[in-house]
Amino acid sequence: MATHQFDHLSLVVSDAELSLAGLSRSIQVGSVDMQQGALYARDLAGALSVLGMDTATSLVEDVARQLTLGQPSVLDVAQGLLPHLTSALKDIQLGHIAQPDEQLKVFSPWASRLQVLVSRDTASLSGFEAVAPKAAHLQLLSPADPGFRAMRMKGLSLIQNARIVNQRDNERTVAQMDALLSEMQDWTLRVGQVPLSQLFPISAQAMQDVWLDTNLLDLLDPLRELGAQAGSIQAQSRSLTIYMDWLGLNLSNEEFQALGKCMSSVSGHVKRLAEGYRLVFPCSLARMRMTPYLQNGQRYAVGAGEFIQFDAHSEGSGFDGALTVCSGLSTRTLKVDRVLPAQNMNIFAVPQDVAKPEGISGVALDAMGDIYYCLSMA
């Protein structure tokens, strides 16, 4: 079991390294993409939290928040943090996780520096949060309807912050308001959701704060029997997307196909690991993390549960890159004109009396109200 736990942490470290690399690319001088950097920073903060790097997690969440707001001062801090975070991840790979006092010694000066620099940009935004919501205080809520209570408590704060922001008259107001409303939308999903641990009660401690829609839990019911064979099950939720690792098992081909079919039904995919499998799927089919892209002049989007990778092609190839997507076990590669920054979007079914292109399962609506066709992998 200890081996399986180590394997899981190795996977989380790998995820953290990918997010750190993405953050580094996004904030390079001359090609700054602060919104995309914010998304990478959020993912990195989630991974650091799982790894026990609480001080670093808090700081990276603050960096994500300021990147979302477009604060120019955060770039200096973010770039300075990169080598320290890289070093911390290398230490974890060697089996050493810094103690709280060690973390404070390294990261507290950067937190203070960020606070000073941001205060020079604009007035302090007390209570403003633009990172993915966590359910850290659910133990204080009524078990009868924790999602509704959490939404009520958080919603009052978010709406008040939105009213404060609305009184300002500067170029940052639109970005601030959009971030607040986006977080409000993400929190709204918590109403009526249920814990993933209902599928695997024995592994409840390894999947805390992982929630999903009840209809998805019903669709995932076939996983109960398959997952019971695993030596360990770990799960975490980042950016409205659930990552679940089954370690210590080797499914038969028939079972693997059944697992893929189940993942396809929830707009997710499964891939093999060294000692098991990783399942990736959204926490809701009504709102999810989407990667938008342009193809032949038309806007499309694919969910994070089906997104695998984007490979940019050299100039003169006739298209800007190849987008690899996977539903269940079925993988496709698409030639696309352009891939846009990922964001959380609301998803809607296309009315039966409205014409739609072949191979479209629905439409996604971004923050600006633009419509993207959702690719059907069926």
Image: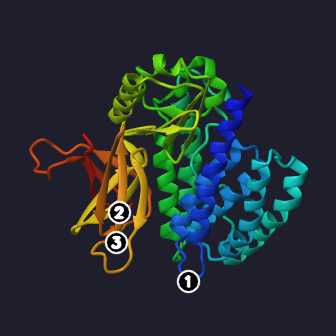
| C-alpha separation, residue under disc 2 versus residue under disc 3 | 7 Å
Kindly identify which numbered label has been placed on residue 352.
Answer: none
CA neighbours of label 3 inside 10 A, class few (<14), some (14 to 19), many (20+): many
Kindly identify which numbered label has been placed on residue 30.
Answer: 1
Q: Secondary structure at mark 1?
A: loop
Contact check, label 2 and label 3, Cβ < 8 Å = no
Q: Position of residue 59 (x, y in %)?
A: 73, 58
- Vertical order, 119 against 194 (above or below): below
Lower position in the chain sequence, tag 2 or tag 1: 1
Q: Which residue is mark 2?
A: 322
Q: Position of residue 256 (x, y in %)?
A: 41, 28
| C-alpha separation, residue under disc 2 versus residue under disc 1 | 25 Å
- Residue found at x 65% / y 74%: 75
Which residue is most to the bottom? 30
Kindly identify which numbered label has been placed on residue 320.
Answer: 3
Q: Position of residue 138 (x, y in %)?
A: 63, 31
Closer to the camera in the image, 351 or 103: 103
Q: Secondary structure at mark 3?
A: loop
* Amino acid at dot 2: Ala
Image depth: mark 1 or mark 3 in front: 3
